[in-house]
Image (cartoon, helix red, strand yellow):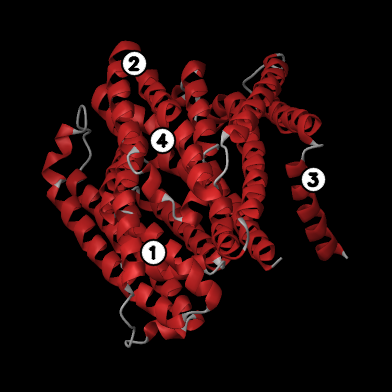
């Protein structure tokens, strides 16, 4: 029960915080596009992507060490925790220095990745400010990982959302007063530094022993496990960076920086939704690690099925909403000139669903430390994605870049990741997983078709019409899902947890 309580507490903080973050983000984006040109929006998205590629220097050290913390935390093995944190500290300081250095070295090569270099003053200094902001986050963030591994992610979430809200309010105020983008970025760097320092001090108070300098050396077995996982995570990092970090680069190279800006609006919404789900899964990850360390494989497999079902419901529902509400919302929010064609929106939403359905698999893989067994998968995924995207962008334009992502996901991640989890984790057949996946997707298409048909009868263009469409999207898919799955074991188990939580709260 303590695992469930901790997970639910983490999830509550994430949902509440993300709601605030999303609301402020939309207002901040309105101020941004009104005060600065679309070119600033484009380079903001592009530089963020470049930094996500430079994050390859992290090499998966964080994931490997967090996995190693689950067992000693469950046993309160303080000497081992201290030894792991000392290793983590040294690794992340080194990574921060490497990212700062690599970022600076790449500065002269910016014209090679930007088609039609925008007329923005001090663009190289702006890029270096992005680099500094990214590098600074590594110098203190290792301590927040200990809090997260100890099933207390709500603590780091509280500070994250607090600083995010304060930063955006200050940035909006100074943009309205000065329209100075460099000042805007300066505040971002300052708040990144302050947040990391305060979370670091909080970790020191919660775990005062991590300040001790008498940490022992790690045993050979733990070192070998960490090194092995880091080797595997290098491949995973390469794949993730190529697949997730190159869309904006390809758009910039083949289409133009303004296209990056348009995509960044869609990406803002997708990232906000993904952030909610990511935080929910991350909030449960430490509890899953604890579950795996203390319970049977059969129990863990059942919990996985329940989490996977919950993930389908969330991502399936969100996918239907995105397809029907993306363009109407952006039209009201920013204007018709910021819209993508519906065919491109469909591909973006398909990729969102396919990626979302991997969350439960990846959460368990991380909690179980199964990085080694699919270490080559990301390399094939990255190669297929890059080749397919470059070929298709020349044939069908912008949509081809995103179809390339679809092709790479279906040909690799879709089947390799569940195969590895079931074979090396649960030690059982993977066929039931794919049967459930097929059923879930069929129900999703049914719910989506009904919802889209009803929305097509309503019209478009006004806030009232958008609200009516939103009501349809919020109602119809959930009714379809409920009718299809209310008798399943997964649904019943999740309802038991929800009922127990409601009784505890309102008893």
* Quadrant in which residue 295 is drawn: bottom right
Identify the secondary structure beneath mark 3: helix
Along the polypeptide, which appears first: circle 1 or circle 3? 1
Q: Nearer the viewer, mark 1 or mark 4?
A: 1
For the N terminus, which image quadrant? Answer: bottom right
- The image shows residue 468, relative to residue 342, as above or below, that is below
* Residue lying farthest to the right in this orientation: 507
Along the polypeptide, which appears first: circle 4 or circle 2? 4
| Residue 48 seen from this side | no
- Pointer 1 residue: 65
Tell me the CA gap for discs 3 and 4: 39 Å
* Quadrant in which residue 284 is drawn: bottom right
Q: Residue at x 33, y 75 (%)?
A: 218
- Pointer 3 residue: 492
- Pointer 2 residue: 397
- Pointer 4 residue: 264
* Residue lying farthest to the top in this orientation: 395
Sort mark 4 into few (<14), some (14-19) or many (20+) by Cα contacts within 10 Å: some
Taking the image as shown, residue 415 lies to the left or right of residue 428, namely left
Depth check, front residue: 38 or 246:
246
| Residue 168 seen from this side | yes
Taking the image as shown, residue 50 lies to the left or right of residue 313, namely left
Q: Nearer the viewer, mark 1 or mark 2?
A: 1
């Amino acid at each position: 029960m303590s695992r469930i309580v901790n997970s639910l507490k983490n999830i509550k903080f994430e949902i509440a915080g993300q709601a605030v973050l999303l609301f402020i983000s939309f207002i901040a984006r309105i101020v941004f596009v009104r005060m600065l040109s679309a070119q600033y929006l484009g380079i903001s998205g592009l530089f963020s992507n470049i930094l996500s590629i430079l994050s390859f220097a992290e090499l998966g050290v964080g994931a490997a060490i967090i996995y190693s913390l689950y067992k000693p935390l469950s046993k309160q093995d303080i000497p081992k925790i201290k030894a792991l944190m000392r290793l983590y500290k040294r690794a992340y300081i080194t990574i921060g220095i490497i990212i700062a250095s690599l970022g600076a070295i790449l500065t002269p090569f910016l014209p090679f990745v930007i088609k039609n270099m925008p007329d923005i003053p001090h663009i190289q200094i702006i890029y270096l400010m992005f680099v500094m902001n990214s590098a600074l986050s590594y110098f203190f963030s290792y301590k927040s990982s200990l809090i997260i591994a100890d099933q207390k992610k709500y603590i780091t979430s509280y500070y994250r959302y607090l600083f995010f809200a304060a930063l955006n309010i200050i940035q909006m105020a100074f943009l309205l007063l000065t329209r100075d983008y460099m000042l805007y970025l300066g505040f971002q760097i300052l708040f990144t530094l302050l947040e990391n320092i305060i979370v670091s001090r909080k970790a020191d108070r919660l775990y005062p022993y991590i300040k001790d300098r008498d940490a022992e050396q790690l045993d050979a077995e733990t070192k070998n496990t960490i090194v092995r996982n880091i080797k595997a995570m290098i491949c995973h990092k390469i794949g993730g960076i190529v697949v997730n970090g190159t869309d904006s680069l390809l758009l910039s190279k083949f289409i133009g920086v303004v296209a990056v800006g348009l995509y960044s609006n869609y990406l803002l919404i997708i990232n906000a939704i993904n952030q909610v789900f990511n935080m929910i899964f991350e909030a449960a990850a430490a509890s899953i690690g604890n579950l795996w360390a203390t319970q049977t494989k059969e129990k863990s497999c059942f919990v996985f099925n329940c989490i996977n079902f919950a993930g389908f419901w969330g991502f399936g529902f969100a996918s239907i909403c995105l397809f029907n509400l993306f363009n109407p919302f952006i039209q009201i929010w920013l204007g018709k000139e910021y819209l993508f064609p519906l065919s491109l929106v469909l591909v973006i939403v398909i990729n969102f669903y396919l990626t979302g359905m991997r969350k439960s698999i990846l959460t368990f893989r991380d909690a179980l430390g199964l990085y080694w067994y699919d270490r080559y998968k990301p390399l094939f995924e990255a190669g297929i994605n890059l080749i397919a995207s470059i070929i298709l962008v020349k044939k069908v334009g912008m949509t081809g870049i995103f179809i390339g992502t679809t092709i790479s996901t279906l040909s690799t991640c879709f089947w390799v990741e569940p195969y590895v989890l079931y074979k090396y984790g649960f030690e059982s057949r993977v066929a039931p997983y794919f049967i459930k996946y097929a059923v879930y997707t069929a129900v999703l298409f049914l719910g989506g078709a009904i919802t889209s048909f009803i929305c097509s009868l309503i019209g478009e263009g006004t806030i009232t019409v958008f609200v009516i469409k939103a009501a349809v999207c919020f109602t119809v898919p959930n009714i379809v899902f409920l009718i299809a799955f209310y008798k399943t074991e997964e649904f019943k188990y999740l309802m038991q947890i929800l009922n127990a939580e409601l009784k505890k709260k309102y008893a």
